[in-house]
Image (cartoon, rainbow, N blue to C red):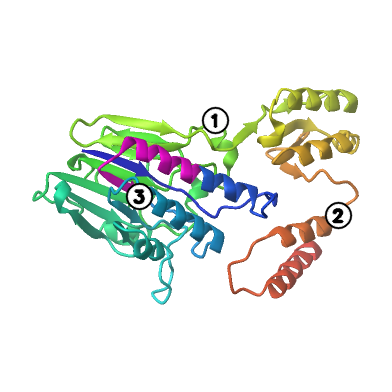
Amino acid sequence: MKLVHLADLHIGYRAYNKLTSKGLNVRERDVIKAFKESLDRIVEINPDLILIAGDVFHRPRPGNTSIYLTIKFLLEFRTKCNAPIVIISGNHEASKSLENENILRVIETTVPNVKVIDRQIEQYVIEPLRVSILGVPYNALCDFEKTSLVPDNNYRYNVLLIHGSYESIKCPELDTHGQASLINAENIGQSKWDYVALGHYHKYTKLAENTYYAGAIERTSSNIWQEALDPKGFIEYNLETGEERFHQLETPRKVVDIKKIDVNNLTSEEINLRIEEEISRINDIEDSIIRLTLENIDNNAIRNLDYSKLRSFRKKAIHFRLNFIKKDSVSDERENTLQEGKDIFQYFEEDLKAFELAAGLDKKRFNDLAKNYLYASIQV
């Protein structure tokens, strides 16, 4: 019996304020393309069961376009593959209040043969497949150590589906949501399950013969540079033989994290030349997300960079980020916005314009409060 394990789709993710000709954020489109490719590849595999280990959407209230395309592609998928889909909620789409229904319910009520597990630990049985699935959504992590996570011996196959952090994986940027419990082999009874499908960690990882993080389908974490070389995709697993295969996707956006350039004792002209040499090595700059870091740089060198050339790189690339690690500085890494003659308040104004608030919040009031806090901190 074959299953497919996906996780961390993050549909609705946006970044960099670059739009397609139809007005869709480029990175939002990237994620949707990766999702569509995943579904097309799954059709070819024709599995018996599909597991999605949380974070289908990037936020609890995604935009209408994200919801529409997700349902559209799933309904198209249903005409070619009728394998049951079981989804648990992750931290990104988890509803915080009982009054707010989880957005995943829209998928459950619209797409046939979909089961969503939200808020509480729940067993879901698929009798024709003789499989029992125990789902532990992110909101239930605080309860799972008080619950006996054991397979149901009435069924041939037992699968544990859980969204959370495994204790041997240190990934602080993922654990900013007040998670109460870490997963480990003992507290989930790891060896007793036929398969343990994990979500939350964005890198494809094998933890045991039966335990895997599928990773994300695109680079959507808070630090995409750590994922620059990581393959993105999903897992195919055979419950009878224990055979596992990772399917790498082709559509994820290229991320280039150029090795740090030590510019100590280089002239500004030499630094500009080194930057141009590094960028020239990237064949498809127009389709890339790029970071370049200059180490041991002083203020004089910063002032004499070729900002005209840097702005041209920024205009061409999906995103071009230039970092400075100043001379005699310890981890003082700053992002250069490639615009001269601006002070901190002007940069802050630009960031506020680009910042996306949750639906229903007052944009003007938020901006006014943010500015007041900044001015107060500068004066202290």
Is 187 left, or right, of 74 in this rendering?
Answer: left
Type of amino acid under label 2: Asp
Place of residue 30 in the rendered image (x, y in percent of width and height, measured from the top left): 57, 44
Type of amino acid under label 1: Leu
Identity of the residue drawn at 72% across and 68% down: 373
Is 158 left, or right, of 143 in this rendering?
Answer: left
Mark 3 or mark 2, whichever is nearer to me? 3
| Residue farthest to the left, as pictured | 154
Type of amino acid under label 3: Thr
> Who is closer to the viewer here, 326 or 259?
259
* Placement of 296 over or under 345, stated as above or below: above
Identity of the residue drawn at 47% across and 36% down: 232
* Placement of 56 over or under 191, stated as above or below: below
| Residue farthest to the front, as pictured | 79
Q: Is-magenta flag for residue 186?
A: no
Q: What residue range appears in magenta?
A: 34-52
Q: Main SS type for the magenta part?
A: helix
Q: Quadrant of the C terminus?
A: bottom right
Per the image, the residue denoted by label 2 is 343
Q: Which mark is residue 79?
A: 3
Mark 2 or mark 1, whichever is nearer to me? 1
